[in-house]
Amino acid sequence: LAESLDSPVYLQCDLENFELVRKTVRHAAEALEGLDALIQAAGTSGDDRFWKCAAPGNYDKLQQIDQAAFDEMMAVNTRGTLAACQEAALWLRKNGGGNILFVRSIDGIKPVPSPIHFASSTAAAKGMMEAMSKELGNYNIRVNIIALGILEGGASRKLSHEVKDAYLKHCSLGRYGRAEEVAELATWMAIQNTYVTGQVIILDGGL
């Protein structure tokens, strides 16, 4: 990935490590001589076994979510996001404002078949985003979420054929999303957005 990108800075980070996340954002901002935007797109979808039965009418995985699985999901997808935003907000204030963007799934935003602890982490991030947009608005910092439907690759590969087929049946555009479509919207939100804040932008082809 580092070799394929034209960027002067590459940093590795474990999102479960709160202080390391803050330190990584700080090192990036220092290396880049400031910060204009934060796109927090990394996360975990958990154990594959929770996705294999994530189909309508199949809820037997509810009882199999133990504390370790739940805590890991929340630590990576929610707590790590908080840490990144805490550090990024300091730099964005120095910059006179900017954009914070979470890239998430529609799970937890719309009632779709999903592992419950995964949807919970997305719903928590939504609440964080909404509250953060109010707190940071006075500093000209916009905070939003892009919520994704099923994509052609990535974590969507974990979904069952039943879920994917049902998605295509109900999706207005009749196809899965593409990574470049996500990138185009995220780039606009990070660089050009000046007035949208506290919002969930759904990118699911009209589910």
Image (spheres, helix red, strand yellow):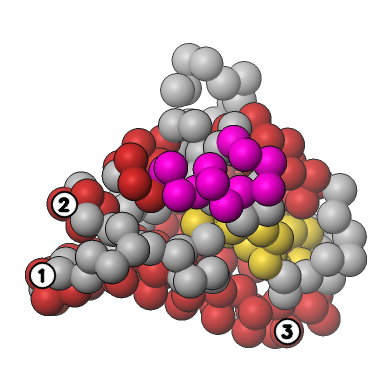
The residue under label 1 is 64
Q: Are marks 3 and 2 in contact (CB under 8 Å)?
A: no
Sequence order check, earlier mark of 2 and 1: 2
Q: Where does residue 18 sit, x and y in percent of width and height?
A: 35, 65
Q: Please report the bounds of the magenta region as a residue range.
A: 164-175
Element assignment for label 2? helix
Whether residue 155 appears in this view of the structure is no
- Residue 168 falls inside the magenta stretch: yes
Please name the amino acid that badge 2 sits on: Arg
The answer for how far apart the CA atoms under marks 3 and 2 are is 38 Å
* Quadrant in which the C terminus appears: bottom right
- Residue 192 falls inside the magenta stretch: no
**Residue 85 picture quarter:** bottom right
Q: Residue at x 22, y 70 (%)?
A: 59
Please name the amino acid that badge 3 sits on: Lys
Please name the amino acid that badge 1 sits on: Gln
Q: Residues within 10 Å of mark 1 (few under 14, many from 20)?
A: few
The answer for how far apart the CA atoms under marks 2 and 1 are is 10 Å
Q: Where does residue 69 sit, x and y in percent of width and height?
A: 17, 66
Q: Residues within 10 Å of mark 3 (few under 14, many from 20)?
A: some
Q: Are marks 2 and 1 in contact (CB under 8 Å)?
A: yes
Element assignment for label 3? helix
Sequence order check, earlier mark of 3 and 1: 1
Q: Are marks 3 and 1 in contact (CB under 8 Å)?
A: no
In the picture shown, does residue 47 fall above or below 168?
below
Sequence order check, earlier mark of 3 and 2: 2
Lateral position of residue 154 relative to residue 69, left or right: right
Q: Which of the labelled discs sits on residue 49, or is there none?
A: 2
